[in-house]
Amino acid sequence: MNMSDTSEFDNLSKELSEFIRQFREKLGTYLPPLRNAVDNIIAQESSDTNAIGSLLDSISSLMYAGIGHQLYLRLLEYYKTVDSEGADFYWRLYEEITE
């Protein structure tokens, strides 16, 4: 690797880091509405397993990018009280994502 290759690599690395930072920042804009939805489900003591599962699916998509873990776990803890079998599926998904 010569000096110009190293410089190109450094530039690409910086650009990629900035892209990832901006991407995660944009994904983070989805957290407040999802947090509100989780808060509502828990506050209303909802037993709508379809709504809870759908919300967990949405949050799990963000977890692949490294955000939303705490929100997911909070809803999952609640879901265990509603449907322990359904929650088991989402626990396994969480473990798969975080391996």
Image (tube, grey):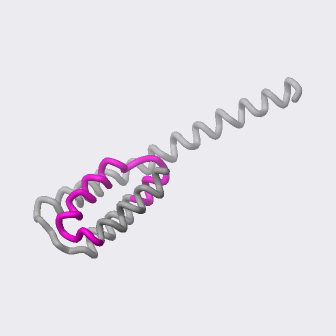
Determine the residue located farthest toward the top in the rendered image.
3
Judged left or right of residue 8, residue 69 is left
Q: Is residue 2 above or below residue 30?
A: above
Q: Is residue 82 above or below residue 14?
A: below
Of residue 70 and residue 38, the one placed in the foreground of this image is 70
Of residue 93 and residue 24, the one placed in the foreground of this image is 93
Of residue 25 and residue 51, the one placed in the foreground of this image is 51
User: Does the magenta-highlighted stretch encompass residue 62?
Assistant: yes
Determine the residue located farthest toward the left in the rendered image.
44
User: Does the magenta-highlighted stretch encompass residue 96?
Assistant: no
Q: Is residue 21 above or below residue 1?
A: below
Q: How many marks?
A: 0
Residue at the image point whose x is 45% and y is 48% from the top: 26
Residue at the image point whose x is 47% and y is 45% from the top: 24
Residue at the image point whose x is 46% and y is 47% from the top: 66
Residue 42 falls in image quadrant: bottom left
Residue 75 image position (x, y, % from top left): 25, 58
**Magenta-colored span:** 60-85
Residue at the image point whose x is 29% and y is 57% from the top: 34
The quadrant the N terminus occupies is top right
Judged left or right of residue 68, residue 47 is left
- For the stretch drawn in magenta, the main secondary structure is helix
Residue 60 falls in image quadrant: bottom left
Residue 7 image position (x, y, % from top left): 78, 27
Residue 35 image position (x, y, % from top left): 26, 53
Residue 69 image position (x, y, % from top left): 36, 49
Residue 5 falls in image quadrant: top right
Of residue 47 and residue 98, the one placed in the foreground of this image is 98
Judged left or right of residue 35, residue 47 is left
